[in-house]
Image: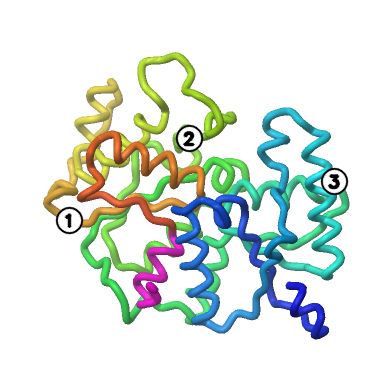
Amino acid sequence: MADLAARGESPEILFWVGCAGAFDDRYKRVTRAFVRILDHVGVNYAVLGKEESCTGDPAKRAGNEFLFQMQAMTNIATLDGYGIKKVVTACPHCFNTIKNEYPALGGEYEVIHHSTFLQQLINEGKVKAEGGESFKGRRITFHDSCYLGRANDIYEAPRAVLEVLDADLVEMKRCKTNGLCCGAGGAQMWKDAEPGNKEVNIERAEEALATLDGTDAVLNNLRGVESNAPAGPASAKAAGGSVIAVACPFCMTMMADGVKNKDREQDVQVFDLAELIASAEGLNA
């Protein structure tokens, strides 16, 4: 961003990478995938680089309002200093904080989650999911992020992005407004599990796997939940390459750990929307 500003230029969007997108080895792959898409379609974008600080979301959720406001005001000063108007991010936590909490501190921006931005690119015909890996016939289920879904009512954009893959999209019993948290909410991402019979991410992973396997009706019966939905076709193992799609770094970590716990890494993978689109466009590095 500093280089653009030095030339007197302004980007179309500011890509807010986020802590996970910058430092977590797994989610850095999502950052690279999204950047390859932006480059491919010719979007004029910039990143803050070392000038980007944590949004303050973890501090605020932990109750440290002072630290949150310090971090937020630093970021607002940086964004305003560059005259940034539009921010796109792949993290629902960053999205929610900048969109809904920065305005109270003077930070007013158009903030877009990357699922919505990808949907826009698809609607404009700039992304067609052609020329790369085919997902036709593969089973994909989408896990709704709490901050993307219930907090900001974004449910259809991620699904619209997945539809372009021409895959077999299957919904979990608990989805959209009734979706179950991945297990990272309530600061659980940062601490040991609470006492109980089962960790939340294991419960959610089991539900996702049962949905992909076509055994969700059986799983519901075990829970005492009535369901008239028939069991789906072949199991994930038989189908090969089934996918749990996510749009959040927290959900990525928790769902991947859940799949690993159930020893299903060989036949079920967890991918972000940007990774799936980049793969379908033939943009993998």
Q: Which numbered disc flags the more N-terminal residue, 2 or 1? A: 2
Give the main secondary structure of the magenta stretch.
helix
Which segment is the magenta one?
273-285
Find residue 37 and report its horizontal and vertical position in percent. Answer: 49, 74
Quick one: SS at disc 2? loop
Q: Is residue 281 magenta?
A: yes
> Where residue 36 sits in the image (x, y, percent)?
49, 74
Visual colour scheme: rainbow
**Badge 3: few (under 14), some or many (20 or more) residues near its Cα, within 10 Å?**
few
Answer with left or right where residue 10 lies relative to residue 256. right
Q: Kindly report the distance in space between the C-alpha atoms of the residues bearing marks 3 and 1.
A: 48 Å
Determine whether 280 is above or below 76 in the image.
Answer: below
Residue that badge 1 annotates: 240
- The amino acid on which the numbered mark 3 sits, given as a three-letter code, is Ala
Residue at 77% in and 73% down: 2
Q: Amino acid at mark 1?
A: Gly
Amino acid tagged 2: Cys
Viewer-nearest residue: 76 or 176: 76
Q: Is residue 132 above or below residue 34?
A: below
Q: Calculate the distance from the C-alpha at mark 3 to the C-alpha at mark 2.
A: 27 Å
Disc 2 marks which residue? 181
Q: Which mark is residue 104?
A: 3
Work out which quarter of the rendered image holds the C terminus and state it.
bottom left
> Residue 131: x percent and y percent?
32, 81
